[in-house]
């Protein structure tokens, strides 16, 4: 069926299309006038998209997610919010509502759940496309009731959003309380262990004490090097003194020995002069000889004393070297012990410091979660509360009539098309030629068309019957 055939079929069955259209429009108007009036209450909410918590000042990534607004819509439509709205409106305490609930459900379930389902059926949440505004819409027959329900859902949603933030924080706060106590006990145990170790080993600051002992070790090492050099020199002098004491530098450089040598030289010169003039038995000769012997004996005695002093000095330096060696060994052992003690002290100090940091972080987190659990702040605010509507939102007679015209026309055309397909008829000469592929001999008009043509062919009163009849 082409377009011309379709139009011819509609032309032939226009009465059916008109009848269906009239019936549809009249029925729609009657139903629109009979239906009770419905009212719409709407409450606008604005959702904070800053993502910053008012208590902690931290960024909340959940609010920056693309589906955050859709999540809020689902929360508003949840049963938990509906139950809170029912409790706020105190609908479950109304005897008429309880009686209606028993009649419809035979007492199965609870009144609160039944009312929540009824309210959710008539509730809708409309998110804005380019803003963070949510509109809670509720439809009903009572303008005061629809406004109250919309506001109740908004308040219930605010309370639920606060609980969704505070309940996890309260649970975390309880967990952090136990963890903080455990971490505090660990910190106290580590600090007590460190204090006991300090008292036991008399360590208050291992680094400073180690620096002092290390400096002392270095000083002893330096003194030992000097003492070793002095001992080696004293040993060499002692050897020379024990071999040839008179040729020893210590003996030669002794001023007393030098004076005795000078006095001995003078006394020997005087004795030689006296021996040339006097006989050995002469008293002057014997006096000079006695003086020379006395000076030589004093010189030898002084050389022995000086040599003994060199030997004693060498022994003293050797003993000092040995003492320095022993002190250096003891100092090395002490420094090694201090290194071991410092390592243990460092380990205990690190344990105590780590325990302190863990306890401080846990205490800080506990304070934060405690504040979050006690906070009643929410990221949603009521922008425009619902008010009782003055004009009803439905039924809309003009809109329904316009829709009825469109729907009635479409239904009428559909019925006409179905009837045409079930009872196909030839509507034009072209269709006859096309379907049967036979030559067309002539066209017989309908009786109405023939009468109309004859009526047009009769002479009129104005021309006096002068026009001839046309076949």
Image (tube, helix red, strand yellow):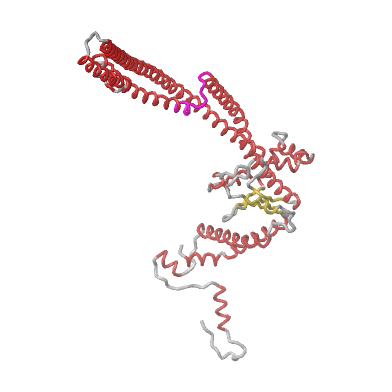
Left or right, residue 137 beside residue 305: right
Specify whether residue 273 is painted magenta: no
Residue situated in front as seen by the camera: 237 or 345 = 237
Residue situated in front as seen by the camera: 360 or 394 = 360
Residue located at (75% from left, 53% from top): 143
Q: Main secondary structure of the magenta part?
A: helix
Residue 428, position in %: x, y?
Answer: 47, 69
- Residue 253 location, quadrant: top left
Relative vertical location of residue 374 with respect to residue 211 in this rendering, above or below:
below
Relative vertical location of residue 168 with respect to residue 289 in this rendering, above or below:
below
Residue 103, position in %: x, y?
Answer: 74, 38
Q: Is residue 204 visible?
A: yes
Residue located at (67% from left, 38% from top): 374
Residue situated in front as seen by the camera: 354 or 309 = 309
Residue situated in front as seen by the camera: 240 or 173 = 240
Relative vertical location of residue 256 with respect to residue 52 in this rendering, above or below:
above
Q: Which residues are magenta?
A: 200-211
- State the residue lying farthest toward the left: 276
- Residue 265 location, quadrant: top left
Residue located at (57% from left, 77% from top): 451
- State the residue lying farthest toward the top: 281
Left or right, residue 416 beside residue 146: left
Residue 15, position in %: x, y?
Answer: 60, 64
Residue 159, position in %: x, y?
Answer: 68, 42
Q: Is residue 240 visible?
A: no
């Amino acid at each position: 069926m082409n377009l011309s055939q379709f139009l011819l079929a509609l032309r032939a069955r226009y009465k059916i299309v008109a009848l269906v259209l009239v019936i549809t429009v009249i029925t729609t108007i009657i139903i629109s006038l009979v239906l009770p009036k419905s009212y719409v209450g709407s409450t606008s909410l604005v959702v904070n998209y800053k993502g910053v918590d008012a208590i902690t000042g931290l960024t909340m990534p959940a609010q920056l997610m693309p589906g955050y607004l859709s999540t809020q819509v689902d929360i508003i439509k949840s049963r938990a919010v509906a139950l809170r709205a029912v409790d706020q409106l105190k609908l479950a305490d109304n005897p008429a509502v309880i009686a209606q609930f028993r009649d419809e459900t035979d007492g199965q379930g609870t009144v609160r759940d039944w009312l929540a389902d009824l309210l959710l059926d008539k509730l809708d949440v409309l998110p804005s496309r380019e803003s963070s505004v949510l509109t809670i819409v509720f439809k009903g027959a009572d303008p005061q009731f629809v406004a109250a329900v919309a506001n109740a859902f908004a308040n219930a949603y605010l309370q639920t959003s606060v609980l969704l933030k505070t309940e996890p924080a309260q649970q975390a706060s309880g967990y952090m309380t136990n963890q903080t106590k455990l971490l505090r006990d660990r910190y106290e145990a580590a600090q007590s262990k460190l204090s006991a170790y300090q008292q036991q080993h008399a360590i208050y600051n291992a680094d400073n004490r180690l620096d002092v002992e290390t400096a002392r070790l270095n000083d002893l090492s330096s003194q030992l090097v000097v003492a070793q050099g002095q001992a080696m020199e004293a040993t060499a002098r002692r050897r020379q003194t024990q071999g040839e004491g008179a040729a020893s530098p210590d003996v030669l450089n002794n001023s007393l020995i030098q004076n005795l040598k000078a006095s001995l030289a003078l006394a020997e010169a005087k004795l030689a002069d006296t021996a040339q003039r006097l006989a050995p038995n002469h008293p002057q000769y014997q006096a000079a000889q006695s003086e020379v012997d006395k000076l030589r004996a004093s010189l030898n005695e002084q050389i022995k004393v000086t040599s003994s002093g060199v030997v004693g000095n060498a022994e003293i330096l050797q003993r000092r070297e040995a003492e320095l060696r022993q002190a250096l060994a003891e100092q090395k052992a002490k420094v090694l012990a201090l290194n071991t003690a410092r390592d243990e002290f460092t380990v205990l100090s690190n344990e105590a410091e780590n325990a302190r940091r863990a306890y401080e972080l846990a205490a800080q987190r506990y304070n934060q979660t405690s504040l979050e659990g006690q906070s009643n702040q929410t990221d949603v605010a009521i922008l425009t509360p619902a008010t009782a509507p003055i004009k009803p939102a439905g039924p809309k007679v003009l809109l329904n009539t316009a829709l009825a015209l469109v729907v009635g026309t479409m239904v009428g055309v559909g019925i006409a098309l179905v009837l045409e397909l079930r009872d196909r008829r030839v509507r034009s000469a072209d269709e006859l030629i096309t379907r049967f592929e036979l030559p067309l001999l002539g066209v017989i008009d309908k009786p109405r068309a023939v009468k109309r043509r004859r009526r047009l062919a009769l002479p009129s009163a104005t021309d006096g019957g002068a026009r001839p009849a046309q076949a």
